[in-house]
Image: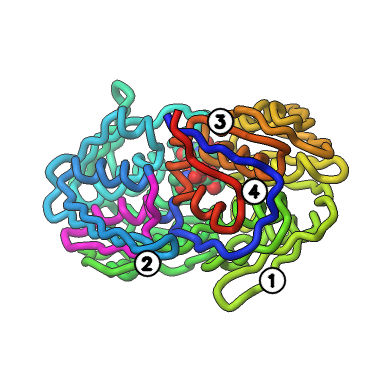
Amino acid sequence: MDRIRIRGGRRLSGEIPLSGAKNAALKLMAASLLTAEPLTLANMPRLADVRAMGELLRTFGVAVTVMLGAGLGEGDVMRLQAGTITSAYASYDMVRKMRASFQVLAPLLARHGEAKVSLPGGCAIGARPVDLHLKALEAMGAKVDLADGYVLASTSGRLKGARIEFPFVSVGATETALMAATLADGETVIGNAAREPEIADLAHCLIAMGAKISGLGTPQLVVQGVDTLHGADYAVMSDRIEAGTYAIAAAIAGGEVELVGARRDSIAALISVLETAGASVVDSERGLVVRMREKLPSAVIVTTAPFPGFPTDLQAQLMALMCVAEGTSVIKETIFENRFMHVPELARLGADIKVTGDVAVVRGVEKLQGAPVMATDLRASVSLVLAGLAAEGETLVNRVYHLDRGFDRLEQKLSGVGADIARIGE
Ligand code: EPZ
């Protein structure tokens, strides 16, 4: 299996074009099940997870075609048409590999009247139940049974509009309720909805397909159900987690990088942390420019939280930066219970991190030393790449498939700004 080799110590300079957001793209693809007409998605990222979702949708009878974009900055175009849904069964094998597969449940149920979708089960970053998804569908009149590790959901006639109040914020459950409500009979009010920008992206796409949704970007979404949705052309938002990751790359390696397509409002929490750490982030015509001062980064205190708080999907990357900061940082993870798997791997590079429960205390060290490392999820993997940029000598990141799931042509983007990084065969 391929590995990524990084030789640390190079300052970064130049521009990185951002790709479309993985966590928006996967849900937009699932939304294609809501209509018999074609949904054409532009600015699609080239990722293993996107291909896996395409494969899953094909098993339901969706015609999926992809036109590859020409360069790094030009996304792919994907056309999806769910003319007739020929199967509404998502196997354990599919859902186990990629949790986002579970997001097909609501659109299959809303359009087809029934679905059998595997429970995702636990994953490397925690237990991650789906109880809120199922409660939302039940509130809308669906009959939901669990048997042999599968969710069997059905509805006689259309789902019914309902008032749903989530006890805590869940991105996935908000998306489930939103997609189901578009084709329900009557009005649905979704309270304590997640406000992650990917939710608004999904809502904008659904609106382009004829859905009636208000309250975008607020904790209360109101949906007036319609009889049918139609096809649409939609461009996926740029990836804020990719933007944040490369912003941290500039901060850890030093130098100046323009993130083309980045939006300040989508990574405001990270920007304020980076500014505390000693970086400057200024708007440019095409995105944001991140510049790191010559001195070491300063330590920070950060707690992950739902948007607009500091994203859990940038926690591992920030920790890599804090490993080489001056002083002691405290990072608290509140979204997932087991999202510190990068800690022992960062320690292999010489980092000084102590974890107690959901808190990691990071004492900055003067230098990290390159070593072979690996990680069990995609954000953890990329944190090791970032640490490698700052480490002395050679870092080899194994299990590259985690990176390929979530980072579009990472090594090309980083070598384009001067990093010494390459993909090597075994
Ligand atoms: C999405 O996961 C993202 N995945 C995650 O990104 C991201 O970390 C997360 O949102 C938080 O921002 C995709 O979009 C594909 P949640 P999701 O439902 O929807 C608990 C990445 O690296 N919960 O907001 O699964 C859950 O266990 C991935 O790209 C329930 O208890 O996250 C977690 O502790 C990793 N019951 C918390 O809520 C439920 O029914 C938040 O999860 C649903 C969730």
Viewer-side label of 3, 4: 3
Q: Earlier in the sequence, mark 4 or mark 2?
A: 2
Quadrant that contains the N terminus: top left
**Residue 305, labelled with which disc?**
4
Q: Is the C-beta separation of discs 4 and 1 under 8 Å?
A: no
Residue 375: give its label. 3
The quarter of the image holding the C terminus is top left
The disc labelled 3 sits on which kind of residue?
Answer: Ala
The reply to whether the residue tagged 4 has its Cβ within 8 angstroms of ligand 1 is: no
- The colour style of the image is rainbow
**Mark closer to the chain start, 3 or 1:** 1
Pointer 2 local density, CA inside 10 Å: few below 14, some 14–19, many at least 20: some
Q: Which residue is mark 2?
A: 235
Q: Earlier in the sequence, mark 3 or mark 2?
A: 2
| Residue drawn 73% across the image and 33% down it | 369
Per the rendered image, the range of residues in magenta is 25-47
Q: Nearer the viewer, residue 167 or 213?
A: 213
Q: Name the amino acid type tagged 1.
A: Val
- Marks 4/1: CA–CA distance: 24 Å
Q: Are marks 4 and 2 in contact (CB under 8 Å)?
A: no
Q: Earlier in the sequence, mark 3 or mark 4?
A: 4
Residue indicated by mark 1? 282
Q: Residues within 10 Å of mark 1 (few under 14, many from 20)?
A: few
Front residue of 340/409: it is: 409
Question: Percent x, y for residue 54?
Answer: 27, 47
Q: Of helix, strand and loop, which one carries label 2?
A: strand
Magenta span has 76?
no
Distance from disc 1 to disc 2, alpha carbons, whole Å, reads 25 Å
- How far apart, in angstroms, are the residues tagged by discs 3 and 4? 23 Å
- Type of amino acid under label 4: Ala
When the figure is inspected, residue 337 is found, relative to residue 309, above or below; the finding is above
SS class, disc 3: loop
